[in-house]
Image: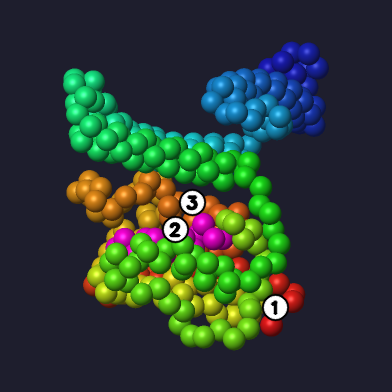
Amino acid sequence: MSVFLYVFYALNVGQILLFAFATFSVSFVITQFRVEKFIYKRINKIYKDLTLLESVSFRKNSITTDMATLTQQIDQFAKNKKIEIETLTVREEYRKEFMGNVSHELKTPLFTVQGYLETLLDGAINDPNVSGKYLERANKGVERLIYIVKDLDMITKLEVGDLSLDVAPFDIIQLVQSVFELLEMKAAKKKITLTFDMHYKHPIMVVGDAERIQQVLTNLIVNSIKYGREKGTTEVSIEKLIKNKVIVRVTDNGEGIEKKNIPRLFERFYRVDKSGSRKEGGSGLGLAIVKHIVEAHEEKIYVESEINIGSEFSFTLEKAKTSV
């Protein structure tokens, strides 16, 4: 008012209000510009810092100065990083366990072979009775090593998708019968009966890689023999399902599996028996291979078990169009 009185020698309310509005507007624009520039610099620095941690650059997205949007983005970033860290932690624990299992599985036959060879080198090779027996045992140790390496090679190919499947229609009844014949002697040692749940009068044609499915059935039946009770039974049944599927069940009345162990059954080298006993052979990869082969066919595998009653492993297959 003093300025207006000095300049115009009069007090004009309209001019004062216009001057006040103009002053406020200019001040507001300057302040807003400076504040936005200040906030933008700070937020831009946050984006740059996040870009250093993120494989996909945040700079590809437009930088927002809206605090709600920014908060949402930061929260999402934090959640994603937490999930990544937890995943890496689980993988690291799995890697350590896997390496320990591989080392344990390989060193047992290696030390066995080494022990027999050292004994032979120390002079036992000159004794025909001892040398023949030790060479045979050393050979068995080498065979076990080859068996483990082959299984590792197969499961690696299955996991990375390098193992192609020769998919064609085949009779699942005939395939099961051939597996029974292959394992007949092994089952006889424990007086275990290999049988179908019923007499199948007609073939049941399914689609898949017959060789790989034979390996699935072999691994499942071998497991049922290993952990089955003497004079027990291993039964295979094939049931037709809706949606052009069949389910193959391998059931035994063996020792069964505790509920807590079932989720980890298909892990490589996972053993229910923690004692480390190796009286029952195998690479420890059988069930892992089974799972990968079934999933390579885009099918499902299931397991049900109860202690001292038995176990049932089952998997689905697609029915062939010519199936009866």
Position in image of residue 28 (x %, y %): 69, 26
Residue type, mark 2 in image: Asn
Q: Nearer the viewer, residue 42 or 208?
A: 208
Q: For mark 2, what is the residue?
A: 219
Span colored in magenta: 213-228
Tags 1 and 3 touching, CB below 8 Å: no
Looking at the image, is mark 3 or mark 2 earlier in the sequence? Answer: 2
Q: For mark 1, what is the residue?
A: 323
Tags 3 and 2 touching, CB below 8 Å: yes
Is residue 277 covered in magenta? Answer: no
Residue type, mark 1 in image: Ser
Mark 1 or mark 3, whichever is nearer to me = 1
Q: Is residue 176 visible?
A: yes
Quarter of the image where one finds residue 272: bottom left
Residue 123, which numbered label?
Answer: none
Position in image of residue 14 (x %, y %): 80, 31
Position in image of residue 135 (x %, y %): 29, 33
* Above or below for 57 versus 246: above
Looking at the image, is mark 1 or mark 3 earlier in the sequence? Answer: 3
- Where disc 2 sits, the SS reads helix
